[in-house]
Each structure stands twice: as C-alpha cells, then as structure tokens.
C-alpha cells in the first residue's frame, strides 16, 4: 500500500499564498501612499508663480569650487545667524534660545543679553546700542548693560510676524525686513510652498519712533543692505531667488526694481562690503527639481507632503558671493560638500569673512578674497 506525499504541495501552496498576501499588502500600501501624496490636506493655499530665470550655477563666477573648505570654525551654540562687531572689535551673535553672545578678541565667550525670542540680523548704531531683528519679538535695542528695549513690533496697526534683518543709515534710520505676514519663525518653508508674497521692507525713525512700510508683497523679505551713498536699499526676496532695489533718493525715489535675479541659490542676508560692494549669502541651491516646482501649485502641495515624510529636496550646498555696487557677481566662495552649510550671513570685518548659519552651532571664518 502506498501513500501520496502532500507535504511539498502544501508548502508550495503556502508560499504562493504568502507571496499573494504580501503583494496585496504592498499594492494597498502603495495606494495609501499615492492617496496621501495627491489628496492629503495642506495647511496653505498655493498660488501660481512665474518660472525662475536661468540658473547660472556652474558657469562663470559660479564655476564650482570648495573655497569655503578653508574656513576655520568657531563653535558658539545652535543657530548663530547674524554677526556684528562693536567699536572695540568684539563679536556678537544670536542663538536659537534667545541669547546673544559676545566673543572678545581673546576668544572668551559670555552672554551679553537674552531677548527671550529669536535674534537674527543685528548691527550697532552710532550710540553703541546693538539693534536686533528678532523674529519673535520685533525690532529691539540693547544697551551696553545688556538691557533690552522694544523699538517696534507693529506697523499700520498690525503686528509684525517675522522680523528678519536690518541695516542702519548714517542719519539713524533703521531699515529692516518683516519676512512674512502669514507664517512666523519656524514655519517659513510654508511661504515657498504657498508662493503667496507677504513680506515687507520697513523703516524705523528713531526720532519720531514711527515705523513705515516702504515695500510690501515681497517673496519672503530677508536680508537688507544700503549702498555706500545711501541712495538705495536692497532687500532679498528669498523665495523668488532675487534681490530687489528700492530707491531712497533721486529721480527714482520711492520706486523699486530687480537688482539681481540670476542666482544659483536662494539669497538670505546681504551686507555692505568694505569696497562699496556687497556680500551675499546663499544658504541653499536652486536645483532642477525645485525650479520645476515653483510654477505649479499642485507640485508644491506634493513637495510639502513629501517633506512631512522626511523627504527633502534641499541640499547642503552654500555660497558666499561678492557683488559689485551695481550688482554684478565677481567672486564666489562655495561648499558643495556640507562642511559649512546653510550659510545665512556673510560679514566682512578687517580682512576676514564671518559666516553665520541657522543650521549649525558654529560661525565660519575665512580670509576675504
């Protein structure tokens, strides 16, 4: 009498069943992923934007180099974005926890003040007060004892949402940016996904203590800088990858125009250079993927959903760019490897460049070219 062997058949059938169930699960998960990618609600309503101008990356002045690799790193704490020097040569910077640090010539580090907010751009006025653009608190003045005074946090009856950077004219007027009227500090990426301009260029008069709006509807108003003659002021529109010029004097006073818009990255802060030109910080690059997203509201919704899954299109690639007084790029210091990344400010001081960053715990220091 013989018995048929059915164990092999049962094993084969079990494997096939497991494969079918696994495949069905993968199909279901993929369907869930697609449903999330295309239909999950987003916390903004994007608008259509014009395409960016040509990207000059890899060409001319922007020929790839690793010059920022030469920078020395000064470790201070998380997020030292803005940098300023007092008359004695002490360095100041603000951290993510609200503290403003002072570094003396010998390298000793101390806490100068605490804004209880998020200090970003800063500069000293003629009286020796440190004027600070605080993203959470507004425009602040800090005296030599470290006492903090609020100068302005409202304009035209509305609260400022994201005070970002500043520069001070010889007559004491403080020009500063309010990056967005819609998204505060920590939510700034929503501004690029939404593509709805709401930033402003503002002016604070220290005599009347009044704040006025010079420009509005800017695409994330960021760094500001005066030219040497103070007849115009520049403001970076980060999420349009351009610099806008606003005329303060002359026949064009009160008007504005594009100063520079063919850049390989997204401009953050801009400062006055020693020779009358400007230093521009580009913390991140324009890529083909990012450029393709800009015109399409639908694509930006998808990008936001991917970002929330931890998938980012932002690369660790920064530039410090030298501009002539007329806005022509003449030098570029670059790091495409991420040793120094998210460079958000470049300040020239006594032959050195000081590189601030939102994303690191150090400032880079390198010889100015």
Image (spheres, grey):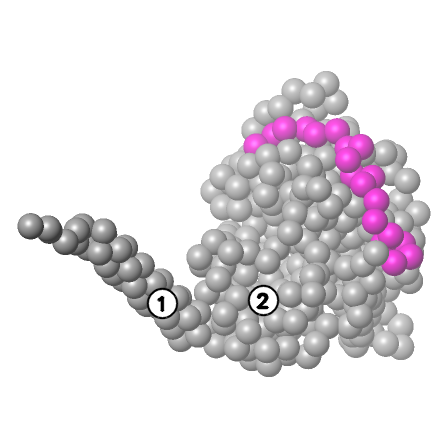
Counting from the top left corner in percent of width and height, residue 179 is at 60, 62
Task: Give the numbered dot on residue 27.
Answer: 1
Picture residue at 23% right of the left edge, 59% below the top: 13
| Residue 147 seen in the current view | no
Is 42 positioned to the left or the right of 261 in the image? left
How many angstroms separate mark 1 from mark 2 (CA)? 33 Å
The answer to whether the residue labelled 1 contacts the one labelled 2, judged by CB atoms less than 8 Å apart, is no
Task: Give the numbered dot on residue 295.
Answer: none
Count residues near mark 1 (Cα–Cα under 10 Å), then give few for <14, some for 14-19, many for 20+.
few
Q: Is label 2 in a helix, a strand or a loop?
A: helix
| Residue 342 seen in the current view | yes
Is 4 positioned to the left or the right of 195 in the image? left
Picture residue at 80% right of the left edge, 32% below the top: 70
Is 261 positioned to the left or the right of 317 in the image? right
Instruction: Give the vertical position of 65 relative to 259 (above or below).
Output: above
Looking at the rendering, which quadrant does residue 52 occupy?
bottom right
Instruction: Give the vertical position of 124 relative to 277 (above or below).
Output: above
Is 331 positioned to the left or the right of 86 in the image? right
Picture residue at 59% right of the left edge, 53% below the top: 139
Counting from the top left corner in percent of width and height, residue 143 is at 62, 38
| 212 or 240, nearer to the observer | 240
| 68 or 105, nearer to the observer | 68
Q: Is label 1 in a helix, a strand or a loop?
A: helix
Magenta span: 59-77
Picture residue at 69% right of the left edge, 21% below the top: 107
Q: Provide the residue designation for mark 2.
A: 192
């Amino acid at each position: 009498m013989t018995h048929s062997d059915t164990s092999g058949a049962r094993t084969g059938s079990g494997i096939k069943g497991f494969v079918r169930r696994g495949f069905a699960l993968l199909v279901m998960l993929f369907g869930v992923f697609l449903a999330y990618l295309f239909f999950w609600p987003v916390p903004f309503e994007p608008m259509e934007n014009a395409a960016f101008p040509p990207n000059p990356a890899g060409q001319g002045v922007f020929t790839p180099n690793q010059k920022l690799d030469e920078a020395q790193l000064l470790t201070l704490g998380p997020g030292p974005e803005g940098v300023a020097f007092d008359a004695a040569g002490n360095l100041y910077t603000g951290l993510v926890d609200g503290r403003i640090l002072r570094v003396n010539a010998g390298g000793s580090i101390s806490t100068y003040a605490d804004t209880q907010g998020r200090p970003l751009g800063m500069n000293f006025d003629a009286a020796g007060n440190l004027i600070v653009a605080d993203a959470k608190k507004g425009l602040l003045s800090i005296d030599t004892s470290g006492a903090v005074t609020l100068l302005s946090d409202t304009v035209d009856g509305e609260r400022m949402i994201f005070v970002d950077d500043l520069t001070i004219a010889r007559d004491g007027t403080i020009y500063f940016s309010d990056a967005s009227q819609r998204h505060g500090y920590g939510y700034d990426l929503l501004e690029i996904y939404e593509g709805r301009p709401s930033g402003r260029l503002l002016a604070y008069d220290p005599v009347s203590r009044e704040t006025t709006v010079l420009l509005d509807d800017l695409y994330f108003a960021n760094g500001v800088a005066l030219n040497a003659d103070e007849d115009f002021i520049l403001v970076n529109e980060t999420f349009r990858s351009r610099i806008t010029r606003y005329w303060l004097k002359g026949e064009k006073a009160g008007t504005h125009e594009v100063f520079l818009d063919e850049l390989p990255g997204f401009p953050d802060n801009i400062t006055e250079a020693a020779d009358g030109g400007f230093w521009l910080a580009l913390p991140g690059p324009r890529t083909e993927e990012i450029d393709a997203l800009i015109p399409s509201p639908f694509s930006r919704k998808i990008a936001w959903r991917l970002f929330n899954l931890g998938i980012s299109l932002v690369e660790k690639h920064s530039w410090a760019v030298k501009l002539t007084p007329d806005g022509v790029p003449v030098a570029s210091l670059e790091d495409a490897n991420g040793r120094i990344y998210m460079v958000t400010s470049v300040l020239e001081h006594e032959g050195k460049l000081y590189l601030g960053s939102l994303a690191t715990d150090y400032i880079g220091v390198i010889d100015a070219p």
